[in-house]
Image: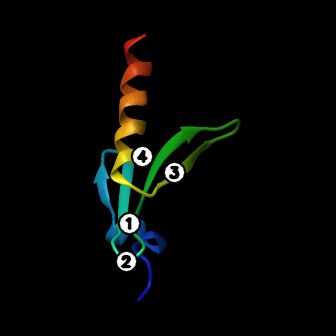
Amino acid sequence: MTSPHTDPDRHGVSFGAVVVTVDVNLGDCIISAPQPGLICTTRRKKRFNSTDEIEGAFTTHLRGQRT
């Protein structure tokens, strides 16, 4: 079986421009979001291997928005 990460448009869940794919067999999650580049907007992908990593990233993100 192929990984859902290979086709995020079909297997991912979209939250606006952010796409989340979860591979239960590998036990990981990839979050892909647009990021401004030098010439054009590109997609940045970040792999998380546990719910603790996802929660930590979310907490850090919220802390950065408050300042």
Residue to which mark 2 is pinned: 25
Q: Amino acid at mark 4?
A: Glu
How many numbered marks does the figure carry? 4
Q: CA distance from mark 2 to mark 3?
A: 18 Å
CB contact under 8 Å: marks 3 and 4: no
Q: CA distance from mark 1 to mark 4?
A: 24 Å
Q: Which residue is found at the position 45% from the left and 69% from the top?
A: 5
Q: CA distance from mark 1 to mark 2?
A: 19 Å
Q: Quadrant of residue 3?
A: bottom left
Select label 3 or label 1 by which is in front.
3
Q: Earlier in the sequence, mark 1 or mark 2?
A: 1
Q: Position of residue 54 (x, y in %)?
A: 38, 46
Residue to which mark 4 is pinned: 53
Q: Amino acid at mark 3?
A: Lys
Q: CA distance from mark 3 to mark 1?
A: 16 Å
Q: CA distance from mark 3 to mark 4?
A: 11 Å
Q: Quadrant of the C terminus?
A: top left
In the foreground, 34 or 59: 59
CB contact under 8 Å: marks 1 and 2: no
**Element marked by disc 4:** helix
Residue to which mark 1 is pinned: 9
CB contact under 8 Å: marks 2 and 3: no
Residue to which mark 3 is pinned: 46
Q: Position of residue 65 (x, y in %)?
A: 40, 19
